[in-house]
Amino acid sequence: MYKSYIKFMERFLCVESNDKYITAINFVSKQETKYTPSKLTEKGVRELEEYFYEKRHIFSVPIFYKGTSFQEQVWDALLNIPYGEVLSYKELAEKINRPKAYRAVGTAVSKNNLSIIVPCHRIIKSNGEIGNYGGGQETKIKLLKLEKYI
C-alpha cells in the first residue's frame, strides 16, 4: 500500500493506493513519519490541491471502493452529484429508487472511504441543515463554500 498526504485546514488527508487505484482518502490528525508514496498517490494529492485552489471540478484518478451492493449503489450516485450542487439524504434515496431508505443511505454515505473525490460532503439534511461529515462540520462547510454552494 502506498500513501501520500496533503494538508487541508488543520488536518491532513491521507491518500492511499495500490498499484492501480486510489483506494482511500481519509482525514487524519497527523501525517505518518514513514510512508511510501507512489505516482498515483502523488497524482491524487495534486488533483486534491487543484480542487482546493478551485482549478479542478472533476477528478481523473482511478478509484476503487468495496462495500455492500447497496453501499456501492449509494457511492456511485454520489459521484453523479455535480460540483457546487447538493442533495438531501432523501433525494439521494429517491435517485437510487429506494425512497424510504434515506436512513440507510445516510449510513452508507458515512462509510464512504474516498472523501472529497466521492463527494459525500454534497449531502445535506432535508431541512437544509448541513448535517454531519467525517472530516467535521467545519470542514464540510469549507468544502461547500469552496464549491460556491454556501
Image (tube, grey):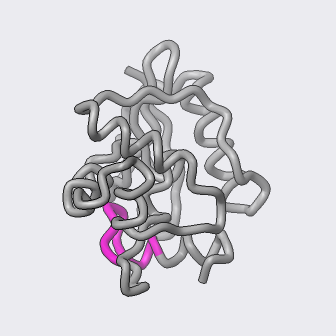
Q: Along the line of sight, which residue is nearer the eye, 91 or 149? A: 91
Q: Can you name the residue that lies furthest to the top here?
A: 19
Which residue does the image show at 52% across and 57% down from the upper left?
7
Q: On the rendered structure, is 58 left or right of 33?
A: right
14, above or below 109, in the image: above
Q: Position of residue 56 (x, y in %)?
A: 74, 52
Q: Position of residue 17 (x, y in %)?
A: 45, 25
Q: Position of residue 62 (x, y in %)?
A: 57, 26
User: Is 134 covered by the magenta stretch?
Assistant: yes
Q: Along the line of sight, which residue is nearer the eye, 38 or 88? A: 88
Q: Position of residue 96 (x, y in %)?
A: 39, 47
Q: On the rendered structure, is 115 left or right of 125?
A: right
Q: On the rendered structure, is 66 left or right of 39?
A: left
Q: Can you name the residue that lies furthest to the right here?
A: 55
| Figure quadrant of residue 54 | bottom right
Which residue does the image show at 34% across and 71% down from the upper left?
136
| Figure quadrant of residue 90 | bottom left
User: Is 2 covered by the magenta stretch?
Assistant: no
83, above or below 138, in the image: above
90, above or below 37, in the image: below
Locate the C terminus by quadrant.
bottom right
64, above or below 115, in the image: above
Magenta: main secondary structure: loop
Which residue does the image show at 64% across and 72% down from the upper left?
146
Magenta stretch in the rendered image: 131-140
Which residue does the image show at 62% across and 31% down from the upper left?
61
The mark tally for this picture is: 0
Q: Along the line of sight, which residue is nearer the eye, 2 or 77? A: 77
Locate the N terminus by quadrant.
top left
